[in-house]
Image: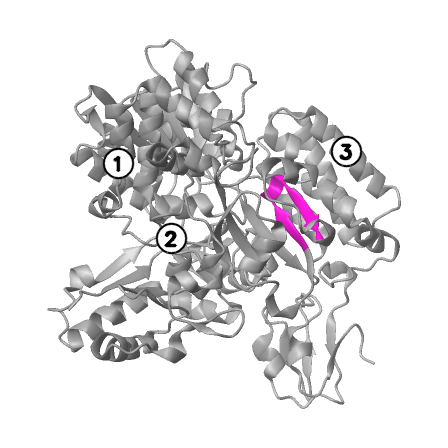
Amino acid sequence: MVRKEILICSGTGCLSAGSEEIEERLMDELWKHELEDKYPLTRAIKRTGCMGPCNLGPMIIIRPEDTFYGNLKPADVERIVEEHLLKGRVVYDLLIEDIDGRRVEEFEKLDFIRGQKKVVMRDSGDIDPSSLEDYLKVDGYMAARKAIMDMERNEIVKEIKDSGLRGRGGAGFPTGLKWELAAKEISDQKYIVCNGDEGDPGAFMDRSVLEGDPHSIIEGMMIAGYAVGADQGYIYVRAEYPLAIRNLQKAIRDAESEGYLGENLFNQGFDFNVELRVGAGAFVCGEETALLSSIEGKQGRPKYRPPYPVQSGLWGKPTVINNVETFGNIAMIIKYGSEWFRDIGTEGSPGTKVFAVAGDVENTGLIEVAMGTTIREMINIAGGVADGKRFKAVQIGGPAGGVIPEQYLDTPIDYDSLKEAGTIMGSGGFIVLDEDTCMVDVAKFFLDFTQDESCGKCPPCRLGTKRMLDILDKITKGNGEAKDLDKLQDLAETIQATSFCGLGQASPNPVLSTLKFFRDEYETHVHDKKCPTGTCKALVEAYTINEETCVTCGRCIEVCPVDAISSGENTYVIDPEKCISCSECAKICPVDAISEGDEK
Amino acid sequence: MEKYHLRDILPIIGEYEKGAGNLIPLLHEVQKKIGYLPKEVQEFIAEELSVPYSQVHSVVTFYSFFTMEPRGEHTISVCTGTACHVKGAEGLTKKLKDMLDVEEGGTSDDRKFTFNTKRCVGACSKAPIIMIDDDVYGKVQPEDLEDILDRY
């Protein structure tokens, strides 16, 4: 009999949905049915990194048949063990219903998975990230072996250059060119730095790769180190990602003890070590020069470029700094060659891009697609807009990016097309917004973020974003004036032109793009003092309960998220101070006694 | 307030070489151990690492993870990322403030919980998110909070 294996997704998303409880129940059930001979407990259940379709968590895959069960509840586990494992029968009603309502057995056949092209996410969700053995089984460190044993340093640089790989951190600088510049520098010490300071709200690609396949990043860095002549690497990870930190620490320790990091690697006289650096909660550290200052033990403030880090980076030494996802591509390019890589994606942007899809779509999670895939196709992979609502826009590129409205849905995803459409590739945040989203609120949300995270070094960013936020605040509170929109535009353009670093220069983008595509919404806020979606609370009146109609059933009290409703004498009362006008109470009221504004 | 002794920190410092390059990892470790980084501790670390006190202080005040105020036994954070914002993180913030009777950054009177907000933790599919220490809770509704807090 073929030994079965149960993969359980243990990424941060699934952990937050209770995957640990599912795992415990699985163990209990295997014990209960004395299956420990057939399924040795330590080996039958494998914790993997992110499988991708995060909103279906907790989820498991049973191998070898590849059966996928998602949205699991602890009570489902008993049936899966008794039916599937003992009797070999798929538990039909626990299978996931796909977009067309069909129940899908195999993981690979989910619509969500079929539309993807996995290069960087190749092993995540498949291997146990805490096991070096597992990584070696999927040809781990074979690309590094090939590079270090069989290739000349300049051959490696050439291969990466030929592949056309561009930096996945957002700006899209050619990786091979960066390596070539660093390789040419003459210095007694060079460094490789991996930028894992994924600070954009709504982006979690790098987190998932670091959690799910940490060795692949170490391998990419090692190949870079060999190619440019660096023997020390640093991985900088946000403190908000404790699981990624744990898995990386383990990966570094294991690689060291098994001789994949340290001295004389593959007996070729090449030394390479990696140290982990944990951030301390400063968004600006995602900017490369600020990140390097942070590793040096200083405040993370950007420095003037040139000199670029490849000339004078960490402690003044030549430094290659690449994003997590960029390093995630390296082993594959070395293994299969630059031509293979160029066959994926588009002429100007070869390869794939991982997006963290969130917001108002049916299936949220990680989607890796070939470059050139259109935004519409991406949304279709994610199952379309949730709850049958109308699509309004998609926000790409986080606080430095912009929104793309319906008329641009057929824009292909590559560095240049997105730039033309008024946003940036960014690191890969992809947030779908439906008709209920207020675009002024979205712009304000991002600006609130950037102004709070401004490091304060240059006045345009420090003061300008604050002034812009003041104006937006005024508009959302119903005090907007006609001239405010022009002022916003003017400030935004000044900040773009005069800020010191990329963060400041990009900070007005969310405002500029919403102003460009949704100016009418701003105007409704300013002139009519109304928020069409009811999001801006000051422009929406608190809800009230009609005393005569109310049957005091109490349902509104249960659904109120802020406990604004209390019982009066013959009716319930909503505290207007507490009410956030979310409308939940009005929706659930069986007698329609609740409405916005004063009692009628 | 929980007491700390400088000698508790010595073994941690002993693990790091002198110089500023190790300052941030060391500050993380020390804060994990005693919960916060008061002035006296910063001065001590500056001396032991041979780094100017001004640099230690500038780093502690620059990064939002470091705090000069003692924290409670557990730290509760509400994620303020885009997805959580859209899915109603504000309701959670409001309820937690009421339950613990604190403002953002404050610590409950029994010193059990410190409450703050946090940048995106990247579990956007399960928004809204709260974190208690390193534990992540997804799709949290205000009415779930009491149950969750009871576990600590």
Residue identifier under label 3: A491
Residue B6 horizontal/vertical position (percent): 28, 34
- In primary-sequence order, the first of circles 3 and 1 is 1
Spatial CA distance of label 2 from label 1 is 34 Å
Which label sits in the foreground, 2 or 3? 3
In which image quadrant can residue A505 be found? top right
Element on which disc 3 rests: helix
Q: Is residue A549 magenta?
A: no
The residue range painted magenta reads A393-405
Query: Marks 2 and 3, how far apart in space?
Result: 40 Å
Q: Residues within 10 Å of mark 1 (few under 14, many from 20)?
A: many
Residue annotated with mark 1: A141
Would residue A346 be seen by someone viewing this image from the given angle?
yes
Pointer 1 chain: A
- Residue farthest left in this picture: A37
- Note whether A190 is above or below A562 in the view shown: above
Q: Residue at the spot x=10%, y=69% of the render?
A: A37
Towards the viewer: B61 or A143: A143
Asked if residue B71 is positioned above or below residue A267 in the image, the reply reads: below
Same chain for labels 2 and 3? Say yes or no.
no
Q: Which element carries disc 1, helix, strand or loop?
A: loop
Question: Secondary structure of the magenta portion, mostly?
Answer: strand
Q: Residue at x 73, y 73 (%)?
A: A543
Q: Which residue is tagged 2?
A: B133
Q: Which mark is drawn over residue A285?
A: none
* Badge 2: chain ID: B
Colouring rule applied to residues: one colour
Return the x and y of residue A151 as percentages of the image width and height: 29, 23
Residues A180 and A33: in front is A180
